[in-house]
Image: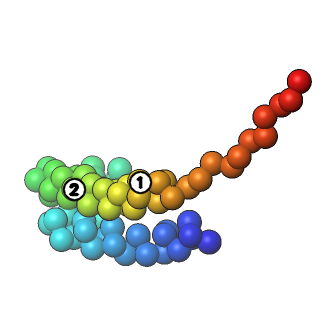
């Protein structure tokens, strides 16, 4: 459930992060080939920045959640 929820919202968040950094979403390598060099460089730079803007908060939440996971007690073998 959470995987699909994340895909639904993070696509919008990621697209907004790319456009906020001065780039455009690129669907394929073919689009890069037909763009002027400056526009392609700006799009790739915005893409990389948006990746960090999306990944770092998610990684921070995952790290905090990891501290609340308790391993299952494994019974010891008795000889």
- Residue 42 sits above or below residue 19 on the image: above
Q: Is residue 54 left or right of residue 40?
A: right
Nearer-the-camera pick, 49 or 64:
64
Nearer-the-camera pick, 66 or 18:
66
Residue 15: assigned label: none
Label 2 packing within 10 angstroms: few (<14), some (14-19), many (20+): some
Q: Residue furthest front?
A: 79
Q: Residue at x 41, y 70 (%)?
A: 10
Asked whether residue 16 is in view, the answer is yes
Between the C-alphas of marks 2 and 1, the distance is 21 Å
Quarter placement of the N terminus: bottom right
Report the residue marked by disc 2.
49
Label 1 packing within 10 angstroms: few (<14), some (14-19), many (20+): few
Q: Earlier in the sequence, mark 2 or mark 1?
A: 2
Report the residue marked by disc 1.
63
Position of residue 22 measured from the top left corner of the image (x, y, whole percent): 14, 66
Quarter placement of the C terminus: top right
Identify the secondary structure beneath mark 1: helix
Q: Residue furthest left?
A: 38
Which color scheme did the rendering employ for the protein? rainbow
Q: Residue at x 33, y 67 (%)?
A: 14
């Amino acid at each position: 459930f959470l995987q699909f929820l994340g895909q639904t919202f993070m696509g919008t968040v990621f697209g907004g992060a790319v456009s906020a950094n001065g780039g455009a979403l690129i669907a394929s390598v073919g689009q890069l080939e037909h763009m002027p060099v400056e526009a392609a460089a700006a799009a790739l730079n915005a893409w990389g920045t948006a990746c960090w803007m999306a990944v770092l908060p998610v990684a921070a939440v995952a790290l905090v959640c990891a501290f609340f996971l308790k391993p299952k007690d494994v019974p010891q073998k008795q000889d």
